[in-house]
Amino acid sequence: MPIKKEPERSTKRKMSLSKTLIPKRKKKNEKKPKKIITKKPVIGKISSQKAMELEEKYGAHNYHPLPVVIAKARGAKVWDPEGNVYLDFLSAYSAVNQGHCNPRIIKAMIEQAKMCTLTSRAFFNNKLGEYEKFITEFFGYEMVLPMNSGAEAVETAMKLCRKWGYEKKGVEPNKATILFATENFHGRTISIITASTDPDCKKGFGPYTPGIDVIPYNSSQALDDYLKKNGKNVVAFIVEPIQGEAGVFVPDDGYLKKRFDICKKNNVLFVADEIQTGIARTGRLLACDWDRVKPDMLILGKALSAGVYPVSAVLTSKEVMLCIKPGEHGSTYGGNPIACAVAVAALKVVRDERLAERADEMGQYFRNELKKIKHPMLKLVRGKGLLNAIIIEPKNGKEAWDVCMMLKEKGLICKPTHRHIIRLAPPLVISKTDLEKSLKILKNVFDELL
């Protein structure tokens, strides 16, 4: 809609009331002034089309992005270079739970960046100890090992589990086994994809890492049966409480608690990868809280920095953590001053703004409203908190990707996984008004598909 430009304030003295009420006489043949129309502001120096062309030409083709370019982001909204606004329903795979460019977190990063950015772990810095105390008390653990990316944190957890197995459990050298669940996603390093059952992640990257095995996810007997046969050398079971990349697959109630109890019985570490599900996303601080389980080891990332800076962490007991000695593991950037300042601010926002409670309340409302949409392509709605998904049954040549493209045209961006599943996971700060708007957009798209 055309927007009238506001007239500039006059610097002249105000005219008397009598003069302002007397209309000026129009001169003969005087033309009416033209309306001034303001265009949407251009954000950045290049267009969406140019940005996509540059990535296609100079970047590795290891992603298949939705054709939308993000140039600006605030809260639950993003803008493209042409000024079009979208509701973000991916949240950088749950990294921006606290909202894009959260001002408290940005302020913490800027203030620290002015003082000291990086020291490496060759020296102490004045932020790391404070951060380590804060995060361990926040989640109720004794020690933390700071890293940067999620995949680094998973690799760190695997090394800790093996070292504990050899030093504390008494596993024979080079015999340690780590168990994972089918349909998992923990990252894309060689060791991690060894545990993957997704051919796209795994095919063409062998040989794979020994000492890794896979059992069915959400199985009532699989872990127990495996440990009865091979428990002597098993050091850990690493699992996602809810499988995000698999399409927000929520296990049966009590699944985590039963697996935890089996691990305790067999002297096996229960390790929860909460990189995507943790930090309030599912309506609890941790998804494990739904089953009242405290993992022996906790892996965090993504929302630990609210998408502002790469920060990840592994939390566990002193018994496990102190198996690693100086020189056996590390990272130049792990525990750097900016990361520490950002992570503390990010967790304080979650606590102070009660984002877990908000995600629980908004998530229940969102799923209930989604279930009211009746369409032959919409087969199932599932999730917890604001980590949700809809299952799409392809019809008339349309599948999940096509639905995402239609949503994008109406101002909502999300991404399909496995061709028939669409994740719907907005920042936890999304307003009720914007959540209602998203539901209208979804309903309109399915109406059009009829």
Image (cartoon, helix red, strand yellow):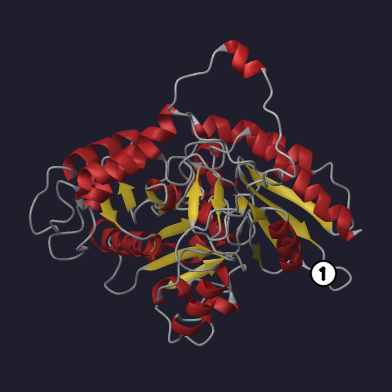
In x, y percent, where is residue 126? 12, 43
Q: Secondary structure at mark 1?
A: loop
In x, y percent, where is residue 95? 46, 51
Residue at (19, 38) in percent of width and height:
130
Residue corresponding to mark 1: 398
Relative placement, left or right, of 33 versus 289 is right
Closer to us: 12 or 343: 12
Q: Amino acid at mark 1?
A: Lys
101 w.r.t. 9: above or below? below
Residue at (49, 50) in percent of width and height:
73
Q: The C terminus is located in which quarter?
A: bottom right
Residue at (39, 78) in percent of width and height:
209
| Res. 252 visible in picture | yes
**What is the total number of numbered labels drawn onto the structure image?**
1
Dividing the picture into quadrants, the one containing residue 370 is top right
In x, y percent, where is residue 16? 54, 13
In x, y percent, where is residue 69? 55, 64
Closer to us: 398 or 188: 398
Residue at (71, 61) in percent of width and height:
404
113 w.r.t. 137: above or below? below
